[in-house]
C-alpha cells in the first residue's frame, strides 16, 4: 500500500472511529440463538472489575437473548448437505486436520496470562455446544480463509476472528449496521471496494469480504508498526480510538501497548477473546473441549456463470439445493446474481464439474426468465420496476432506454424470477420476513406499522412503549439505519396494548396514494396539494433530472385527513 492510501485510510478511520466501535463489537453480531447459548447461565454486573466485566454474556448480549427460544439459526437449519466432522480415530492427531494447521502456526504469545483472557477462556470452555456450532459453520469457509492468510504471510490466529465477529454467520447483522462474517460497516466496506447495491452486498460475500478484511487488518498492522494486538483493537473500535488512548498514556508516562490502554469496554474484551480462542484451539484437551475433525481440503469451488443468472437456475445446473447456493453466496440479495458482477458463484467443490458441463449446454437467453411488458398509458419506469420487483436501471440497461421517456404501445423486456417469491427462501426479503415473525410462537402480539414521513426509531418506540433496540432487532436493522416512508415495521407488544395503538393510528390516517402527474404539475404543487414535503416525494420515488413528466406515476404517503 502506498503512503497516499495510508494517509487516506488513517484520515477516514479517524472520522469513523466513533461508529467503528459498535459495529465490530465482539459477539454483537452473533446470531441471537448463539447469544442464548452464551448468556443463559450468566448474570451481568456492569460495575464489576476487568476480571469478570467483559464476559461473553455482556449486557447487550444478555438483552438480545431474552426472547430467543431456539438453539439453531436460520443459517444452520438451511443447510441440506450433512457434514461429517468426526475423527477417524478420536485419539489421533492428523496432519490433514485443518485445525492442526492452525495450531502449528499460531503466532500470538499463548503463554500470556491476564485476568481478562482467563475469564473469556473459562466461558468459552464451558460451552461445548457453542464451539461445536461455530466449528461446523467455520468448516465451510476455514480452508479458504487459512489459504488466503497464508498467501499474505499473516498470523493464522486471525482465522479465528470471525468467531468473535459473527460466530461465522455470513448473514450476521449487528446493531451498528455491520454485516457479514467479518462485520463491515457500509463506509469501511466501500473503502475496501465491497460493492453494495440492490442486487448484491459484498460485505456478505465470502470471498470478497475475506479479501477486504485481510487488507484492512494488514493496513492497520502497518499503521501500528507491526503490533497485531493494536491492529485488532483498531479493527474493533477504529484506529482513532486507539491512537487517542495511546496519546493519553504517553502524556501520563504509561506504556502504550494494548494491555495498558484505557479503551472502550467492547474493545478491552475483544483482544482477550482472540487470545482465549487461540489457547482453546491450541490445547483443547487441556480445557476439556473436543474439537471436530476438519479435513484440510477446499469446501467450495468458484465457477463462472458467464453473466447474470437466476439462482434457482444455478442450483439446478450445480445439482444443489437453492438454500445451499444462497449459503455459499450470501452476498446476493435477490433472486439472481448482480448483472454487473461479480460473475462468480461458489458451489460445492464436488459439484464444480457438473455445473461447468451443464453451463455448456445452456443457451445464454435461458440463464434468466424474461417477461415482455406492453407499456400502457400512465405507465412509468418506476411503476413498472415496482410491479416486477426490479430497479429502473435494470429496465433501462436491458432495453437500451435513455432517460425516463417511454411510449404507450411499445414493448420492453424485463428479467423476472423463474419461481415464485417464497421459493427464494433466503433472499434478503424472505430472510426479513422470517426475522419479523420470529416471535410468532410467543405470548406477544404483532402489529405492522407503516413508517411515515419524519418518523424516527425513537418516535415509534414511544408510541408502542418498546425499546429502540427491540424495534431494530425485530426488523433486522440497526438503530441508526434510515427509515423509509412506506416501510413496514413489525412491532411486538404485550397483549392489552391494542387500544392504545389503535388510538394512535386513528389520529394519523396515513395511506399510500398513487398519483399520476398532470400537465402543469410540479413537485412544489403536488407537495402543497397533499401537505407533504418535496424532499419526501423525492425519497419515495426515483426521480432523475429536474423535472417530472405528465403521465409519470408517483407514490405518496399522506395523511388523508389533511389532503387539500
Image (cartoon, rainbow, N blue to C red):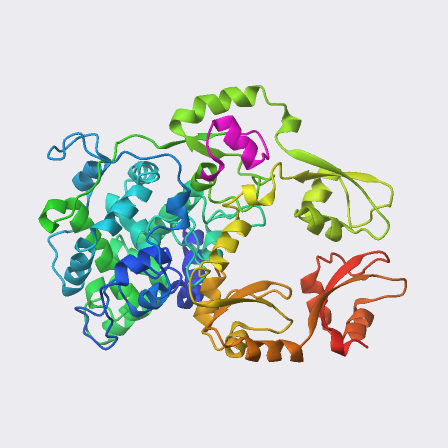
In the rendered image, residue 51, in percent from the top left (x then y), is placed at 16, 68
Residue at 54% x, 36% y is 311
Q: Which residues are magenta?
A: 304-323
In the rendered image, residue 253, in percent from the top left (x then y), is placed at 19, 74
In the rendered image, residue 68, in percent from the top left (x then y), is placed at 36, 61
Q: Is residue 15 left or right of residue 308?
A: left
Q: Name the residue furthest right.
A: 519
Magenta-colored stretch includes residue 306 = yes
Q: Is residue 86 left or right of residue 476?
A: left
Residue at 78% x, 61% y is 546
Residue at 34% x, 48% y is 168
Foreground: 55 or 344? 55
Image position of 148 with respect to 515: above or below: above
In the rendered image, residue 353, in percent from the top left (x then y), is placed at 45, 21
Could you tell me if residue 446 is visible in this image?
yes
Tally of marks? 0
Q: Is residue 16 left or right of residue 234?
A: right
Could you tell me if residue 223 is visible in this image?
no
- Work out which quarter of the rendered image holds the C terminus and state it: bottom right
Image position of 361 with respect to 112: above or below: above
Amino acid at each position: 500500500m502506498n503512503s497516499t492510501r495510508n494517509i487516506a485510510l488513517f484520515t477516514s478511520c479517524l472520522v469513523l472511529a466513533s461508529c467503528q466501535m459498535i459495529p465490530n463489537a465482539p459477539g454483537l453480531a452473533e446470531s441471537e440463538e448463539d447469544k442464548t447459548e452464551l448468556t443463559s447461565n450468566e448474570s451481568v454486573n456492569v460495575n464489576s472489575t476487568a476480571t469478570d466485566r467483559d464476559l461473553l454474556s455482556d449486557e447487550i448480549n444478555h438483552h438480545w437473548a431474552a426472547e430467543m427460544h431456539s438453539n439453531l439459526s436460520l443459517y444452520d437449519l438451511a443447510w441440506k448437505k450433512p457434514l461429517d466432522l468426526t475423527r477417524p480415530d478420536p485419539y489421533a492427531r492428523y496432519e490433514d486436520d485443518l485445525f492442526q494447521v492452525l495450531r502449528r502456526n499460531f503466532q500470538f504469545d499463548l503463554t500470556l496470562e491476564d485476568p481478562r483472557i482467563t475469564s473469556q477462556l473459562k466461558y468459552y470452555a464451558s460451552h461445548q455446544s457453542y464451539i461445536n456450532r461455530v466449528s461446523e459453520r467455520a468448516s465451510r469457509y476455514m480452508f479458504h480463509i487459512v489459504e488466503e492468510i497464508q498467501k499474505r504471510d499473516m498470523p493464522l490466529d486471525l482465522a479465528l476472528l470471525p468467531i468473535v465477529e459473527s460466530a461465522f454467520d455470513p448473514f450476521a447483522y449487528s446493531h451498528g449496521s455491520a454485516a457479514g462474517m467479518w462485520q463491515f460497516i457500509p463506509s469501511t466496506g466501500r473503502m475496501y471496494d465491497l460493492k453494495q447495491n440492490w442486487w448484491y452486498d459484498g460485505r456478505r460475500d465470502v470471498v470478497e469480504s475475506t479479501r477486504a478484511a485481510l487488507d484492512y487488518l494488514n493496513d492497520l498492522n502497518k499503521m501500528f508498526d507491526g503490533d497485531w494486538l493494536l491492529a485488532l483493537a483498531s479493527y474493533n473500535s477504529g484506529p482513532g480510538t486507539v491512537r487517542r488512548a495511546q496519546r493519553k498514556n504517553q502524556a501520563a508516562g504509561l506504556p502504550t501497548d494494548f494491555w495498558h490502554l484505557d479503551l472502550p469496554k467492547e474493545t478491552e474484551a475483544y483482544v482477550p477473546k482472540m487470545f482465549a480462542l487461540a489457547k482453546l484451539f491450541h490445547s483443547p484437551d487441556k480445557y476439556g473441549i473436543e474439537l471436530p475433525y476438519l479435513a484440510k481440503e477446499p469446501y467450495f469451488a468458484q465457477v463462472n456463470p458467464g453473466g447474470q443468472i437466476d439462482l434457482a437456475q444455478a442450483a439446478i445446473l450445480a445439482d444443489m439445493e437453492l438454500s445451499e447456493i444462497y449459503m455459499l453466496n450470501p452476498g446476493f440479495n435477490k433472486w439472481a446474481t448482480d448483472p454487473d458482477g461479480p460473475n462468480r458463484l461458489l458451489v460445492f467443490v464436488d459439484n464444480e464439474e457438473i455445473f461447468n458441463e451443464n453451463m455448456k449446454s445452456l443457451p445464454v437467453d435461458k440463464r434468466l426468465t424474461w417477461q415482455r411488458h406492453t407499456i400502457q398509458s400512465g405507465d412509468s419506469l418506476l411503476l413498472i420496476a415496482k410491479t416486477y420487483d426490479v430497479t429502473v436501471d435494470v429496465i433501462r440497461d436491458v432495453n437500451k432506454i435513455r432517460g425516463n421517456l417511454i411510449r404507450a404501445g411499445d414493448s420492453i423486456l424485463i428479467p423476472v424470477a423463474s419461481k415464485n417469491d417464497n421459493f427464494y427462501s433466503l433472499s434478503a426479503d424472505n430472510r426479513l420476513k422470517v426475522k419479523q415473525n420470529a416471535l410468532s410462537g410467543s405470548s406477544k402480539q404483532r402489529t405492522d406499522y407503516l413508517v411515515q414521513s419524519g418518523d424516527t426509531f425513537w418516535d415509534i418506540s414511544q408510541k408502542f412503549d418498546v425499546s429502540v433496540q427491540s424495534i431494530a432487532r425485530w426488523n433486522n436493522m440497526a438503530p441508526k439505519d434510515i427509515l423509509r416512508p412506506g416501510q413496514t415495521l413489525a412491532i411486538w407488544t404485550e397483549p392489552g396494548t391494542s387500544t392504545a395503538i389503535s388510538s394512535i393510528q386513528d389520529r394519523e390516517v396515513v395511506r399510500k396514494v398513487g398519483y399520476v402527474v398532470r400537465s402543469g404539475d410540479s413537485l412544489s404543487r403536488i407537495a402543497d396539494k397533499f401537505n407533504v414535503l418535496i424532499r419526501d416525494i423525492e425519497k419515495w420515488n426515483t426521480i432523475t433530472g429536474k423535472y417530472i413528466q405528465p403521465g409519470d406515476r408517483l407514490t405518496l404517503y399522506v395523511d388523508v385527513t389533511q389532503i387539500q
